[in-house]
């Protein structure tokens, strides 16, 4: 069932991409044809005076309107079909694919198996703002995530209401981490947090209060060093075992669960050695089950110059507010990403995390 729904969501994603591409192509054709006909009308001296030129221009505009209207009719028909499909699919999604407002969370139970994918938000195009496609990413994650907390550039007037972009970015990170914790079997996914200055305490409260973190958020340079050291050693150990063809030779009782490191306020608390270890985790970690989620503003690390460009490029950039920066693999539209949001006043996220914590306690972890 999960695979069928996953394929159906991706089918809707592709259908919408191609439908909008066809509409945009038709409008571009209509525009170019109108301009060509107007140029031809103006190039004839006889048509520039009297009513003959006016009639030619009016005819060109009428043909343009007719072509655009036809294209819009086809688009509206396809959008209606996709909307009807979405209205059937969305309520049927399992927790891993469902939004936080889906009633399926009220019957949540800690899963026994890892799902194919997890929902990281929604996507939409300007031609169909009300039709939102779930953004599903295959598990285990193949690359790290970067939640862009930059408050300047790229977001327009989104933060004009005084909202703190860094706090919103951390809330998005917590929502995503909670989703990953919820869709993995008990004890199969661990979350570590580096918060050098303690600035994310309020956003991290759901994770800290429910006890689902692998340990308290790391503070200061010493905390950064400790967490990075343990995780890089883990990557080294598993890589050596795999390269030696002896994955079963890990120490007895070794925790083989997937691990996620959330880094807030980068590069605060990071020296050059810590930055090198972070880049190592971003490059080598995903292949052995150690994943990175950066909550950072790129401009804060501008002092490193191009040194960190490979790090930013290796991460999938997400935003705490709607932003049209993601491209589809078929026609390359700029899709607007909508971050996952817990409904105002809802306790669903804390309730789910409490069940995750209970499942761990039952396992003695």
Image (cartoon, rainbow, N blue to C red):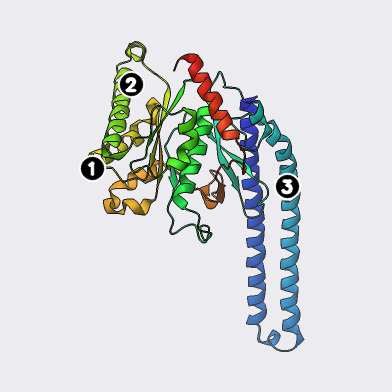
The residue located at (53%, 43%) in the rendering is 329
Q: Is residue 342 left or right of residue 92?
A: left
Which numbered disc, 3 or 2, marks the residue that appears first in the sequence? 3
Q: Nearer the viewer, mark 3 or mark 1?
A: 1
From this viewpoint, is residue 104 visible? Answer: yes
Which quarter shows the N terminus? top right
- Mark before the other along the chain sequence, 3 or 1: 3
Residue 71 in which image quadrant: bottom right
Residue 257, x across and y down, in percent: 42, 21
SS at mark 2? helix
Residue tagged 3: 78
- Label 3 Cα neighbours within 10 Å, binned few <14 / some 14-19 / many ≥20: some
Residue 365 placement: quadrant: top left
Tag 3, which secondary structure?
helix
Residue 252: x and y, percent? 34, 10
Towards the viewer: 292 or 25: 292
Residue 196, image quadrant = top left
- Residue 263 in percent (x, y) is at 38, 39
Task: Residue 334: give x, y in percent of width and height.
Answer: 54, 52
In this view, the residue in front, 237 or 171, is: 171
The residue wearing badge 2 is 238
- Residue 360 or residue 277, whichever sits in front: 360
Q: Nearer the viewer, mark 3 or mark 2?
A: 2
* 128 left or right, relative to 226: right
């Amino acid at each position: 069932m999960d695979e069928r729904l996953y394929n159906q969501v991706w089918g809707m994603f592709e259908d919408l991409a191609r439908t909008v591409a066809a509409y945009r192509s038709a409008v571009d054709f209509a525009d170019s044809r109108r301009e060509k006909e107007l140029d031809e009308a103006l190039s004839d001296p006889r048509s520039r005076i009297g009513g003959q030129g006016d009639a030619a221009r009016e005819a060109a505009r009428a043909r343009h309107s007719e072509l655009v209207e036809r294209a819009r009719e086809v688009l509206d028909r396809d959008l209606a079909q996709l909307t009807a499909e979405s209205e059937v699919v969305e309520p049927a999604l399992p927790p891993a694919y469902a939004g936080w407002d889906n009633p399926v969370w009220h019957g949540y139970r800690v899963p026994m198996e890892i799902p194919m994918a997890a929902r990281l938000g929604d996507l939409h195009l300007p031609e169909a703002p009300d039709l939102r496609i779930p953004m599903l990413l295959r598990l285990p994650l193949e690359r790290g995530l970067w939640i862009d907390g930059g408050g300047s550039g790229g977001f327009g007037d989104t933060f004009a209401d005084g909202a703190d972009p860094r706090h919103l970015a951390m809330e998005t990170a917590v929502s995503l981490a909670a989703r990953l914790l919820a869709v993995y079997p008990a004890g199969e996914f661990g979350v570590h947090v580096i918060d050098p200055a303690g600035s994310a305490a309020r956003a991290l409260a759901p994770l800290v209060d429910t006890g689902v973190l692998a340990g308290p958020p790391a503070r200061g340079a010493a905390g950064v060093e400790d967490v990075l050291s343990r995780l890089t050693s883990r990557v080294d150990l598993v890589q050596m075992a795999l390269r030696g063809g002896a994955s079963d030779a890990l120490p007895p009782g070794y925790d083989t669960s997937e691990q996620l490191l959330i880094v807030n306020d980068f590069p605060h608390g990071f020296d050059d050695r810590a930055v090198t270890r972070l880049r190592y985790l971003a490059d080598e970690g995903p292949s052995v089950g150690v994943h990175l989620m950066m909550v950072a503003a790129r401009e804060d690390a501008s002092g490193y110059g191009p040194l960190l460009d490979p790090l930013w490029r290796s991460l999938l950039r997400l935003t705490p507010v709607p932003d049209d920066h993601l491209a589809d693999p078929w026609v390359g539209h700029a899709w607007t990403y909508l971050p996952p949001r817990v409904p105002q006043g809802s306790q669903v996220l804390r309730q789910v995390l409490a069940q995750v914590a209970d499942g761990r306690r039952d396992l003695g972890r």
